[in-house]
Image (spheres, helix red, strand yellow):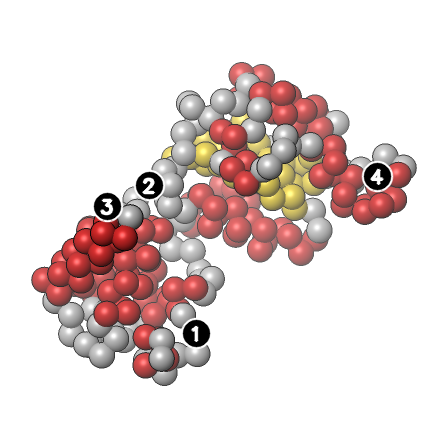
Amino acid sequence: MEWYEEMELDDNPFGRETKLVGFDDVVSEMNYAITSGGMMFIEGGKGSGKTKLLKEAIRRFGGYGKVIYVNGRELHTELNVERLLKDRYGVLGRLFNKKPIGMILLLDDVEHISKRNCERIKYYFDQNYLRSIVFASKSYADSGINESVKQRIWKVISLRELTNYEAVQLVRNKLGNDMLNDRAIKEIYKLSNKNPKLFLENCEKVCKVAARNKELTEEDVNTILSEQHTEEMVVA
């Protein structure tokens, strides 16, 4: 039996998509950039929430069939922007060189995109095939984006750390009020170096071990995560 089944839950709460916490201002800026037809850049370290934000844009605008999402890290060949646009019309688009107007392009891990492709992206933006573009990477300065493209970027946003209150709310949205108390959640957040992705992974590790313990202390959290880290080091 899985730990969450012992809690009488149907599925793993940490696998659920829940409301974004702590990024309201960024979401507002991103929505403005998309609706007004501009370019913006979101920078933040691994696990800081960049991909989560782009998924929020897909949720808000994807229903109109106007969103193209590309993760540069997952590309097996060079990005072909023209092909992506033509594919929106399927076989007819490729046969008759038909491309949609006003698409929204979300580029994750943009540091893996070549400078040549950045120029192509700018071209399709200038021709109105791309209405707006949101770039995401760990660093704006080290993204490798051409200067000519940087000149078009309306705003660069650096993701901040969640506050302790926001970290607690993030877990509450997924897990409810059972199992982990506020003190335990804050301790897990601190031990996760305040990285949202690692934080949620560590919350799940603690829950797996302590499914039947409703009153975890900070010392319990330290012990569980220390033991988990040791086991992972031995396996590696």
Furthest residue to the left?
219
Q: Between marks 1 and 2, how big is the CA–CA gap?
A: 30 Å
**First along the sequence among labels 3 and 4:** 4
- Tell me: residue 143, above or below residue 207: above
Residue sitting nearer the eye, 158 or 202: 202
Q: If you read the primary sequence from the N terminus, does the residue marked by circle 1 or circle 2 appear first? A: 1
Which residue is labeled 3 in the image? 193
Residue kind at label 4, given as amino acid type? Arg
Density class for disc 3 (Cα within 10 Å; few <14, some 14-19, many ≥20) is few
Q: Is residue 189 visible?
A: no
Q: How many marks?
A: 4
Tell me the quarter of the picture where residue 200 sits: bottom left
Tag 1 and tag 4, C-beta contact below 8 Å: no
Q: Position of residue 163 (x, y in %)?
A: 26, 50
Q: Vertically, is 202 above or below 120? A: below
Q: Residue 180: give x, y in percent of width and height.
A: 23, 69
- The reply to whether residue 185 is visible in this rendering is yes
Residue at label 1? 11
Q: Position of residue 100 (x, y in %)?
A: 78, 40
Q: Residues within 10 Å of mark 4 (few under 14, many from 20)?
A: some
